[in-house]
Amino acid sequence: MNKNIAPIAEAMKNYSQDGALAFHTPGHKQGLGAHFLLQELITAEGLRREVSLMEELDDLHDPRSCIKQAQKLAAELWNADEAFFMINGTTSAVQAMIMAALKPNDLVLVPRNAHRCVMNGLILSGARPIYLMPEYDSKFGISLNLSVETIKSAIKKYPQVKALIIVSPNYYGVAANLSEIAKFLHEQNILLLVDEAHGAHLRFSEKLPLSAIDAGVDLAAQSTHINANFNAAF
């Protein structure tokens, strides 16, 4: 597959150049009725390309063309088996990841510094959390990450745990030892789910910690943090 393409952006460009009349959402009708403040934020061409529900632009819920092709490229880029684009920020990706992996009453290990979307995902899935305290750096007054020892101790106490959810890198940029954690958990037949919202860049430099997928985790939720705010659960 040609990697020097942007399937979704190219599909949007082609549609805007087809000359189709806009009898569909959004209400600004390809920019013709856009408020002047919106016109200041988005270029005229950008407004023409902001359309929805068009067959030419694929269906996020059942991708068959440009979105499917873009997801395949993303999976290859991040070394994942599959990639799924999400909307509504990494929050929706984390919640989808939790609901895909856990069922009601499953026990799951969760660090105390997890994002609130993890709590929402646990409520939606019906899974029951066991909270773990991450390491703490008293010099800088910040939370670090879960240590391997903390995780092993929790598994010994709660052998029925189904998964561990971890934030790596955390909000201070501290990455967990995902390779060792993944190896240990998989020996216990326990899933490792990673909120990697701040780690989409890790795969692109050998000077950075291993990305979650390269470290062998089961599922990871990422955000590339671009203006379009595309997110992916791998």
Image (cartoon, grey):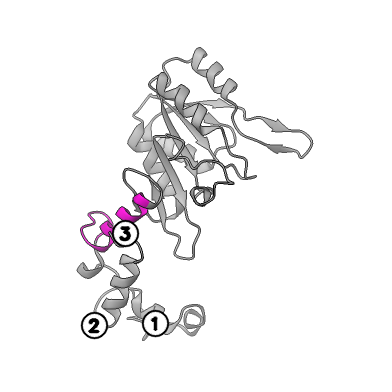
Label ID, residue 27: none
Image quarter hosting the C terminus: top left
Q: Is 9 on the left-hand or right-hand side of 154?
A: left
- Please provide percent x and percent y for residue 45: 39, 82
Q: Residue at the location (35% across, 27% down)?
A: 104
Is disc 2 surrounded by few (<14), some (14 to 19) or many (20+) residues within 10 Å? few
Report the predominant secondary structure element of the magenta stretch. Answer: helix
Tell me if residue 63 is in the magenta stretch.
yes
Residue 124 visible in the picture: no
Answer with mark 1 or mark 3, whichever residue precedes in sequence. 1
- C-alpha gap between disc 1 and disc 2: 13 Å
Mark sitting on residue 18: 2
Q: Secondary structure at mark 2?
A: loop
Q: Name the residue type under label 3.
A: Ala
- Magenta stretch: residue 15 in it? no
Q: Amino acid at mark 2?
A: Asp
Can residue 13 be seen here? The reply is yes
Residue, disc 3: 70
Q: Quadrant of residue 34?
A: bottom left
For the magenta stretch, what is the residue range? 59-76
Does 84 appear above or below 158? below
Q: Residue at x 30, y 80 (%)?
A: 16
Residue drawn 47% across the image and 40% down it = 212
Callout 1 amino acid:
Glu
Bin the neighbour count of mark 3 within 10 Å (Cα to Cα): few under 14, some 14-19, many 20 and up. Answer: many
Q: Quadrant of the N terminus?
A: bottom left
